[in-house]
Amino acid sequence: MKALKVSARLIDARGRPCPWPIVELAKALKAAPEVELWADDPAARADLDSFCEATKATVLSLHVEGALLQAVVRRAAG
């Protein structure tokens, strides 16, 4: 299994099953106002939508190419 790379700005969760990408996104958004997420789990898109709805985070950009989802997410103000 590929190692999970996490920084304050980028979460490379390729090869990791959900919910790991969203769990790591939530952690990273506590430290940085905007985080880029890379994920290739088929459930990542739906999980990202649910996460943003629940937390009021905003998807600033979203690109899907094949199985790879790349999104920039901003945490909710407040």
Image (tube, grey):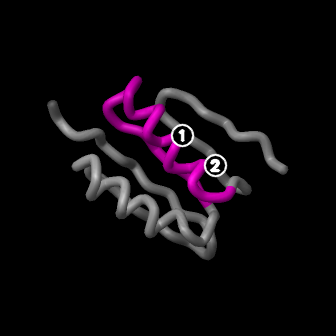
Magenta segment includes 29: yes
SS class, disc 1 = helix
> Which residue is the site of mark 1?
24
Magenta segment includes 25: yes
**Percent of width and height locating residue 73:** 36, 47
> Which residue is the site of mark 2?
13
Q: Is residue 33 left or right of residue 26?
A: left
Give the residue type at disc 1: Glu
Give the residue type at disc 2: Ala
**Mark 2–mark 1 contact, CB under 8 Å?**
yes
* Badge 1: residue crowd in 10 Å (few <14, some 14–19, many ≥20): some
Query: Could you say which quadrant of the image residue 75 lies in?
Result: top left
Q: Is residue 39 left or right of residue 2?
A: left
SS class, disc 2 = loop
**Percent of width and height locating residue 16:** 69, 53
**Percent of width and height locating residue 26:** 43, 39
Q: In the depicted view, which residue is nearer to us: 16 or 14?
A: 16
**Percent of width and height locating residue 78:** 15, 30
Q: From this viewpoint, which residue is outermost toward the bottom?
A: 66
Q: Which mark is residue 1?
A: none
Q: From this viewpoint, which residue is outermost toward the left?
A: 78
Q: From this viewpoint, which residue is outermost toward the top?
A: 31
Q: Is residue 65 left or right of residue 75?
A: right
Sequence-wise, which precedes: disc 2 or disc 1?
A: 2
* Badge 2: residue crowd in 10 Å (few <14, some 14–19, many ≥20): many
Going 36% across and 63% down the picture, which residue do you hit? 49
Going 50% across and 49% down the picture, which residue do you hit? 22
Report the span colored magenta: 17-39
Q: Nearer the viewer, mark 2 or mark 1?
A: 1
